[in-house]
Image (cartoon, rainbow, N blue to C red):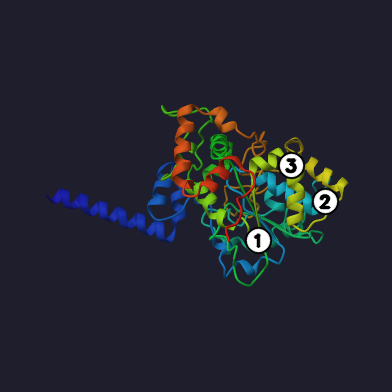
Amino acid sequence: MVTIKKIGSAVVGIAMLIGAVGKFVPHWFMTMPFPLSIILWISTGHGMPPYFSTDAWKEDEIDTWTRDGDLVVATGAKSGTTFMLYCTHQIRTKGKDTDDELFPDVSIATPWPDLIQSRGGSWAEQKERYNTTILPDGRTMKEVWDHPSYPFRIFKSHFGPPELPVRKKGGKKIKYLAMVRNVLDVAASMTDFYSAHTDEFRNLWGGLPPDIPPDVRDADGFHLAMKDMLPGNSIEGIYWGYVNSWWPYRNDPNVILLHYSDVRKDLKGSVAKIAKFLDVKLSSSELNTVVNRCSMEHMKKANKFHYYMPLNTDSTWNNNEHFIVKSGKMVNKGHVGKGKDKFSPEVVAKFREAEEKMLGHDPALLKWAREGGGFPPVES
């Protein structure tokens, strides 16, 4: 009996210790091996992934660092985010940044306020460093992302409403570009994405995302990334939550909601549409230049998409040499329909079932999320 009481007391003590760490210093969990690190992180009430935060977008905070005309490229994960960041930069420069002098890296030219760059960091702690951090070439980071020649600044996010205050009353007038992709194609990209991260980044965040090669599947044909996306699992919100959150805002004047397949099928028309939304007038020659620089072929050649973390303060991280993803891994073929071609009929059926469950409440949304195309008429 005494032994049982001792065991019980020890269990209670451990639980209290884990709870205290989760409340006051949760980043300590990130020093533990995967998956223990993530189990402890989630079990103490923290959201996934551990390096994301919505603090920059809170209504009482967003006006402190944005200005009228800013663009938030808030595309879904693995739905053309880097593509749109680079393309909107080409639009704002009218394709004249030919040597990418103003685009040394995607995370410097188009900052990502969602991302907490240091273990134990916060938006409040790293906010000012967006202005003061000195880059290897001697410029401050602000001189790049807030260059005086820009008609608007560009920021990255993977969130949707309500985390992004799209209909905020008063304050700065901000525009939002959102983009959805067919879920099978997102899942196919996610299988490549897990192993695309560098070991240095993974070591900061408790082994997340796990280094699982794209061809490693379970008995049912699922990669872990694909399972994580399914309803009820750890990152279901990055697709189902994202799509549902943006759909009601598709006709808002400060929102342009795109479908990845439409943009890939008609890049020139899409660039013209985005430029009009951003109030940028492109001549025929400028439009052709921008379209060329937005192509996958040019982006692969440019290779400005390592995602450095220049605001990081961890001793194990070298701001000039370490980055989030391995070289060349952020720009792929961007093939439309690759998920359906790549997966077994059983996997495709499972995702079709998930689509019906999560998006089937609105048949127009379900059809559009799968195929793209025009929006249905607005109901009066």
1 vs 2, front mark: 2
Residue 136 in view: no
Quote the CA–CA distance across marks 1 and 2.
Answer: 29 Å
Q: Is residue 288 visible?
A: yes
**Between 21 and 73, which is closer to the camera in this rendering?**
73
Between 30 and 93, which is closer to the camera in this rendering? Answer: 93
Identify the secondary structure beneath mark 1. helix
Q: Earlier in the sequence, mark 1 or mark 3?
A: 1
Ranked by sequence position, the earlier of labels 3 and 2 is 2
Whether 258 is drawn above or below 191: the answer is: below
Percent across and percent down for residue 335 are 65, 33
Q: Which residue is mark 3?
A: 267
Give, as a three-letter code, the residue at label 2: Lys
What SS does tag 3 mark?
helix
Q: Is residue 255 above or below residue 216?
A: below
230 on left or right of 246:
left
**Residue 139 x %, y %:** 77, 56
Q: Which residue is mark 1?
A: 129
How far is mark 3 from mark 2, CA to CA? 15 Å
Residue 94 is labelled as 2
Residue displayed at 69% across by 43% down = 263
Q: Quadrant of residue 254?
A: bottom right
Query: In the rendered structure, which amino acid carries the disc numbered 1?
Result: Arg
